[in-house]
Amino acid sequence: MQIEDAKTSNRTLVRQAVLDCASQILAEEGPQALSMRKLSQKLGASTIVLYTYFKDKPEILNELYLEGFERLRADLEAVPSGTDAMEYVMQLGRAYRKSAVRNPTYYQIMFSRCVPGFTPPLASLQKSKASFEILVNGVQRCIDAQLVVPGDAREIAEVLWGTLHGIISLELFGYLGPSRMGEARLEQAIQTIKAGLTRHIA
């Protein structure tokens, strides 16, 4: 999208175009290449127009951070809750991987601190937790249905999330080979965690 006139462009579309362009630069050229001047050149606009929408690069990075978590939250919320609480949690894990694979650059900004000097503001950190709460609620459903050993739903969710996050990160950074290997390793982890959570249930 070429930004030619900030006064006539749709603000939402323009902001999204800037974020998409910033994400592309990060993916193709690395974090050091991202600058307001680079963005303005790729978007076909002056830096003055760009500053109409974002006050500086940290604000753009924060918007990328929030957009990444918004996409993750939407992907998790799209998982049908169904009647089987355990299967729902497993599906959340699969949806988490698919979301990360579709949005690898956003995922890195969300979790790897790939841009030196950028730290999400406290308000953004709080907003980012919305997607995790979906998993916590899913685990709580399993506990309430006596499908897993009793415990703290948040602690269990943290273990599940941390395990899957590690495998997904290995895949995105190229340590697991073809995507089908990443999918297979994630499935193996899901089944192992499920067995561990249910092994003491009569």
Image: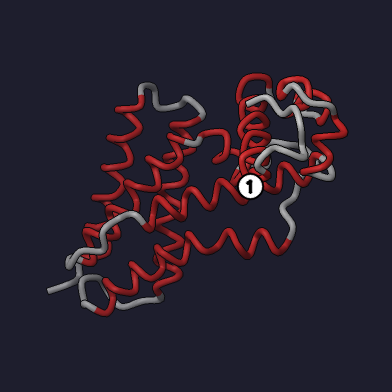
- Seen from this angle, which residue lies furthest front? 8
* Colour scheme in use: secondary structure
In the displayed structure, would residue 145 be above or below residue 171? below
Residue 68 seen in render: yes
Q: Amino acid at mark 1?
A: Tyr
Quadrant position of residue 39: top right
Could you say where residue 51 lies in the image, as x and y percent from the top left? 84, 39
Measuring 58% from the left and 58% from the top, which residue is drawn there?
128
Could you say where residue 162 lies in the image, as x and y percent from the top left? 46, 53
Of 22 and 180, the residue lying toward us: 22
Measuring 51% from the left and 63% from the top, which residue is drawn there?
130
Measuring 49% from the left and 48% from the top, which residue is drawn there?
71
Residue 32 seen in render: no
Of 99 and 45, the residue lying toward us: 45
Q: Residues within 10 Å of mark 1 (few under 14, many from 20)?
A: many
Quadrant position of residue 34: top right
The quarter of the rendered structure image containing the N terminus is top right
Determine whether, in the image, residue 48 is placed left or right of residue 75: right
Of 136 and 170, the residue lying toward us: 136
Could you say where residue 158 lies in the image, as x and y percent from the top left? 46, 61
Residue located beneath label 1 in the image: 65
The quarter of the rendered structure image containing the C terminus is bottom left
Of 25 and 145, the residue lying toward us: 25
In the displayed structure, would residue 89 be above or below residue 200? above
In the displayed structure, would residue 94 be above or below residue 39? below
Measuring 58% from the left and 47% from the top, which residue is drawn there?
67
Determine whether, in the image, residue 146 is placed left or right of residue 166: left
- Seen from this angle, which residue lies furthest right? 48
- Seen from this angle, which residue lies furthest left? 202
Helix, strand or loop at label 1? It is: helix
Could you say where residue 119 lies in the image, as x and y percent from the top left? 75, 50
